[in-house]
Amino acid sequence: AQSVTQPDIHITVSEGASLELRCNYSYGATPYLFWYVQSPGQGLQLLLKYFSGDTLVQGIKGFEAEFKRSQSSFNLRKPSVHWSDAAEYFCAVGVGNTGGFKTIFGAGTRLFVKA
Amino acid sequence: DGGITQSPKYLFRKEGQNVTLSCEQNLNHDAMYWYRQDPGQGLRLIYYSQIVNDFQKGDIAEGYSVSREKKESFPLTVTSAQKNPTAFYLCASSIRPNTEAFFGQGTRLTVV
């Protein structure tokens, strides 16, 4: 069965430090891959996506993610975290074909940023 | 401005009552989705629609119903058969089913 795992329920980093949020998926083929961010009580905003091509993708707000097929991973990174990055982050995979396509979300990782 | 509008933002209902959550988009997207979000569980798909007048059940459709009579609108009804309806509900749309989704601001439903 397809699934998405975000191993870290929450992470705390200092402002200015680097960040890496982990995401692993289970799917028989290469899925479409997404990272979204959610502020409390709000909807989700797309940070970046991977469909094909270069496995290192750049997103908004200085985020990037790298697709590693051998590890079934799509980890999100940022070199220097800002206090405004505190939010919940969701990894998602798109699976299926023209007969039926759906997006599966991970459980999320809540990021805390300390001064 | 284009986007997805969910209303209301907060909704309170008594147990046993049906309630309908509104979702409207002016992005001209074909696909629309309803998700339920509970703490620590991420987003779970309730229903989705890839085209007008067609929709499919997601992973947790029991106790919910939808309609897709217009491209712009995808209302969700939470029926009295839903045993634990208190949750945060998110509507989303995408240009096509296999592209990124755009989300509304959500409706927090509390059943008392």
Image (cartoon, rainbow, N blue to C red):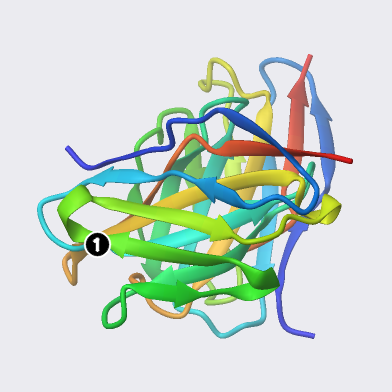
Residue found 69% across the figure and 24% down from its top = B17
Is residue B104 visible in the rendered structure shown here?
yes
Q: What x and y, as percent, mark residue A27?
A: 17, 49
Judging depth in this view, the residue of A73 and B35 nearest the camera is A73
Q: Which residue is mark 1?
A: A31
Looking at the picture, does residue B1 appear above or below residue A67? below
Q: Which of the 4 quarters of the picture holds residue B84?
A: top right
Count every numbered label the image shows and give the total: 1
Looking at the picture, does residue A48 appear above or below residue A114? below
Judging depth in this view, the residue of A71 and A50 nearest the camera is A71
Residue found 64% across the figure and 52% down from its top = A18
Quadrant of the frame with the C terminus of chain A: top right
Residue found 61% across the figure and 60% down from its top = A78
* Chain of the residue displaying label 1: A
Quadrant of the frame with the N terminus of chain A: top left
Q: What x and y, as percent, mark residue B23?
A: 66, 60
Position of B22 with respect to B93 (left or right) is right
Q: As shown in the figure, which amino acid type bears the numbered disc 1?
A: Pro
Look at the numbered disc 1 and give the secondary structure of its residue: loop
Position of A83 with respect to A7 (left or right) is right
Is residue B102 visible in the rendered structure shown here?
no
Residue found 53% across the figure and 77% down from its top = B71
